Amino acid sequence: LDILERLSAVGAAYDSSGGRGRALCASGTRSSQLKILKDWVLDTSSNKKLFWLSGGVGAGKSSIAQTIAKFCAERGCLAATFFFKAGDETRSKVSRLIPTLSSQLAASSEISWRAIDEYLKRYPRALDEKNLQEQFQWLVQYPIWSLTPNKCTLKTPKLIVIDVVDESNDFDELRDFLSSVVSSLAEHKCHPLRILITSRPEQPIDAFFAGLSKDSYANIDLVHDDESDNDIRLYLTDKLAHVRSKHYRDYRESLQDWPHKSDIDWLVDRSTGHFIYASTVVKFIDNDMENPALQLDYILRRLNTEVSSESSPYEEIDKLYTTVLT
């Protein structure tokens, strides 16, 4: 299976070293979305094999995907994962998707390894010459089928996670892949496979899912999620309490009644549902060389006024301000 290793994307798996920047959902946050996803994965009677989780930049899609992948891995129902990353030499390429998923399946089970090996020995140029639907069926679906004598009797469905597909480098190739997946799932309705796809709600991806029957997939839209503010408030309250405890000995006087509820409310309001805003603020405040209260005061003053044209020493906050809120 050397060809799969050569064509696999480095760092695309949920537990790879390349995923160190992907955080799990903070305790108590995204509880309703995680419950919906967990129930969907484990429901053997569901006809919806495909799940689309959509949301804007920093809405927490990757954290949810990472959390669900870990949940399934701990229960033996994770098949494979692919976390796209824009600009990455391999993780931005749709052409690396099937080899990467198949390579992970081969590594997870000798039975799956044997099924993949037999197919590639029979068709050594399959990844160059076979269409995407056939590649997906024989290098991804069939190796999962092979885990049970009857492909419809696997007690727990297997999950494939494909995160932030909008960061791929070729939307036409992505559409072809998604079409092949939908066709394969429709052709084999009792197959014990679930596929979670996350993305921003960009036009080509929106258009693809709009063209599908509503009965063929499930969807959570984080763009219009009423629970985001509550989750971000919970996240900020928890993380800033940790910051206070960590720095209290050095800055006891200024951290007595810190942080104020009104300050957290202000940050929640400015986050506009974007977890990346809240997490970057916490990272900025939790500076071992600075007083957290002064760091928070700086943010409140800075973001209450128009950003100046002069370069700022607080580059991370300026970057967040321009990237998330514009």
Image (cartoon, rainbow, N blue to C red):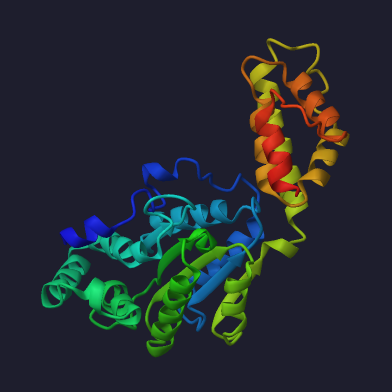
Q: Which residue in the rendered view is the most extreme toward the left?
A: 121
The percent position of residue 210, horizontal first and vertical second, equals 62, 81
**Residue at image point 57% right, 72% down:** 205
The percent position of residue 288, horizontal first and vertical second, equals 61, 17
Q: Which image quadrant is residue 318 in? A: top right
**Residue at image point 62% right, 52% down:** 60
Residue nearer the viewer, 1 or 41 = 1
The percent position of residue 283, horizontal first and vertical second, equals 64, 31
Residue nearer the viewer, 212 or 15 = 212
Residue nearer the viewer, 257 or 16 = 16
**102 up-or-down from 268: above or below:** below
**116 up-or-down from 30: above or below:** below
- Total number of numbered labels? 0
Q: Which residue in the rendered view is the most extreme toward the front?
A: 309
**236 up-or-down from 158: above or below:** above
The percent position of residue 211, horizontal first and vertical second, equals 59, 85
The N terminus appears in which quarter of the rendering?
bottom left
Answer yes or no: is residue 178 visible.
yes
Q: Is residue 34 left or right of residue 159?
A: right
Q: Is residue 67 left or right of residue 250?
A: left
**Residue at image point 37% right, 74% down:** 155
**Residue at image point 43% right, 87% down:** 186
**150 up-or-down from 30: above or below:** below
Answer yes or no: is residue 143 visible.
no
Q: Is residue 218 left or right of residue 106?
A: right
